[in-house]
Amino acid sequence: MQIDDRIYGPVEISEPVLTELIESPAIQRLKGIHQFGMPQRFYPYPGFSRYEHSVGVMLVLRKLGADVEEQAAGLIHDVSHTAFSHLVDWVMGDREKEDHQDKNLQRVVSLSTIPEILHKHGLDSDKVTDVKQYGLLERPAPYLCADRIDYSLREFHTWADPKIVTQCIDDLVNHNGQIAFRNKDSAKKFAYAYAKCQKEHWGGAECTVRWELLARALKAGLSEGVVNPEDFYQKDEHLIAKLRDGGIDEVSKVLSILERPRLKLVENRNNPQFDLRKKFRYIDPHYVVNGFINTLSESDSNYKSFLEEQRRINERGIKVDLIE
């Protein structure tokens, strides 16, 4: 199988277990799941699918020398994402933790053809779906891991800082099982671009209000029986179609608002129409000097202060009115 990835370029995949997993219905479904929580026409930032991200995670792991089992885990790690990705946590989960997908991974995988494919090639499904055991694939924030690296690089590529993408990829290393950069310069560039995504996009007012609006529409659809929880294991557009056909005025209004290229939002710290807070995402990458690993915030007081300021900004929350 030849993969021509827009971030990592052309890569040949010859391992049968990986090619069969990529072609499986469960992973192919991810082509219809948008990484940022809603279809592109409702969103102001250029995005990509969970499928593209899952393949990308596998390619990062491949570059870092992970074995086939961990690469398979990378391919599978997002299979349990529902339509609208982490936005489902705002509808029927925990919006602070955004962990609905993690809690359901083994169940969703067990209902797919993935266990059969893994068993055929001598891999254990229960082990491969225990993704936290794979130190290159998953690490808790603020450390680097293949999952965090891939979605970041894709966003850097599309808008946040395209010029650093190749440098960051080239400078990634596997240092005794810990992902790091070859030098401080690449670590800093990655860290500041990641912070830009958090401030302007992931934790910004525009996209957070869009999430809240779609969450309200989905809750209304569930309440009225227009959609049901099982629908969330279809694709984004399946649920949007059901919402549109449901005849709920509130939902129709929300979908119309979401189609605007930009929302007109005005800050209101006293009595806002929207009083929201988004999960604070940050990175504190490692880099290597003379064979020893360093952490950016421990060696760069400016970055440490910058992180503290960004956290304070996020904690203030988003208090805005939508001007219709």
Image (cartoon, rainbow, N blue to C red):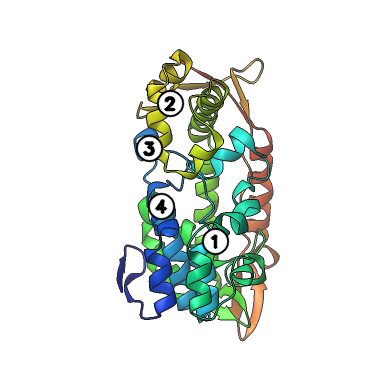
User: What is the CA distance from the residue labelled 2 to the residue labelled 3?
Assistant: 10 Å
Report the Cα–Cα distance between label 4 and label 3.
12 Å
Which amino acid does the dot numbered 1 rest on?
His
Write down the quadrant of residue 129 in the picture: bottom right
Disc 4 crowd rating (10 Å Cα; few below 14, some 14-19, many 20+) is: many
Looking at the picture, how far across and down is residue 30, in whole percent? Answer: 42, 53
In the image, which disc is placed on residue 243?
2
Q: In the displayed structure, does residue 184 sit left or right of residue 247?
A: right
Of callouts 4 and 2, the N-terminal one: 4
Relative to 309, is 1 above or below? Answer: below
3D distance between C-alphas at marks 2 and 1: 28 Å
Mark pair 1, 3: CA separation: 22 Å
Give me the C-alpha separation between circle 1 and circle 4: 13 Å
Give the mark nearer the N terminus: 2 vs 3: 3
Q: Is residue 104 left or right of residue 206?
A: right
Residue carrying label 4? 29
Residue type for callout 3: Glu
Local crowd at mark 2 within 10 Å, few (<14), some, or many (≥20)?
Answer: many
Q: Position of residue 253 (x, y in %)?
A: 42, 17
**Is residue 297 shown above or below 248?**
below
Query: Which residue is identified by label 3?
Result: 237
